Image (cartoon, rainbow, N blue to C red):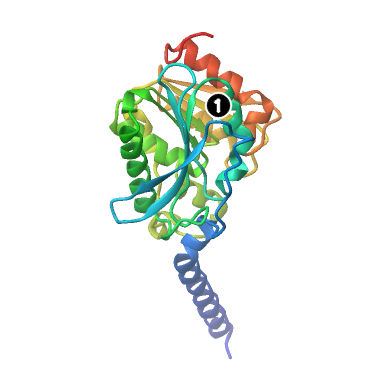
Amino acid sequence: MSVLAVVAAVAAVAGAGYGAAILYMYGRQRALLYHGSPRRPELNPHELPGMREVVVRTEDGLDLLSWYAPPARGRRVLVLFHGNAGLLDERTEKLRLYLDSGLGVFALAWRGFSGNPGKPTEEGLYRDAEAAIARLAALGHGPEDLILYGESLGTAVATKIAAERPVAALILEAPPLSIVKMGQLRYPWLPVSRLVKDRFETDRRIGRVTCPILILHGRHDAVVPFSMGESLARLAPGRAELAAFDDGAHVDLHRYGAVERVMDFLVSRGVVEQT
């Protein structure tokens, strides 16, 4: 066999292997992106006083578990859109700190998470968020009462809602620019932009947000690079502030003073009154 024939054979094998890898990643991408759980978390009233379970009914007929507590002062409600993994009860520490601040709190569990029915997709999560906004309206809270708080993947959903409604404020903790850019970072050998189904393009939407925006990001975040938070802040000049946490990692910033930073921001922007 000639050298050219050997090279051609190796190239063919390599090409077949690369093609197989692309097909595998394309087929498995949602399993890699979403890490839901069939376990339904228990709400402990001693840990979260005043909070109760509420049901959110989506446009496509799913009943989703959510937790809600009305505000102790004023009318503002912090609406938590969590990230691509975990359960509501894993946010108890963070939720309690915001309850202690006097805000109302509404924590939504996505479809396929915290024992909820359905399978998560980008469009599905947007439907879940829309249903949560409708449920809050039924509870007496219009968009102008809402402080949207997104964690990681949830920041993309929060940003989309804030770009379309006159909400009071938008808080983004560890926000990716988009899933496309995250994929390009993690899999530089793949044509990610052509493969990704659920794109979550916060970088394309944040410029349409008109409310005050606070971006929280830990410098030791090993999941979403700190540089992405910096880039998003630059895409909304005059409206967005970036709060960097030198010791913070990924969505653990409430342990490093993030709640105090959020409340100071909300007071400074006139969203809540000084207590």
Question: Residue extending furthest top?
Answer: 274
Relative placement, left or right, of 141 versus 78 is left
Q: Is residue 136 above or below residue 201?
A: above
Relative placement, left or right, of 268 versus 139 is right
- What type is the residue that disc 1 sits on? Leu
The residue drawn where x is 41% and y is 57% is 196
Residue in the foreground of this view, choosing between 256 and 95? 95
Q: Is residue 111 visible?
A: yes
Q: How many marks?
A: 1
Image coordinates of residue 213 in percent, x first then y, are: 44, 24
The residue drawn where x is 63% and y is 31% is 253
Q: Quadrant of residue 101?
A: top right
Relative placement, left or right, of 33 versus 197 is right
Q: Is residue 252 above or below residue 262?
A: below
Question: Residue extending furthest right?
Answer: 247
Q: Is residue 251 visible?
A: no
Query: Dot 1 lies on which element?
Result: helix
The residue drawn where x is 54% and y is 83% is 9
Q: Quadrant of residue 212?
A: top left
Q: Quadrant of the C terminus?
A: top right
Image coordinates of residue 114 in percent, x first then y, are: 52, 53
Q: Is residue 35 above or below residue 181?
A: below
Image coordinates of residue 271 in percent, x first then y, are: 42, 15
| Disc 1: CA contacts within 10 A as few (<14), some (14-19) or many (>=20) | many
Residue in the foreground of this view, choosing between 253 and 112? 112
Image coordinates of residue 7 in percent, x first then y, are: 56, 79
Q: Is residue 260 above or below residue 131?
A: above
Determine which residue is flagged by label 1. Answer: 99
Q: Quadrant of the N terminus?
A: bottom right
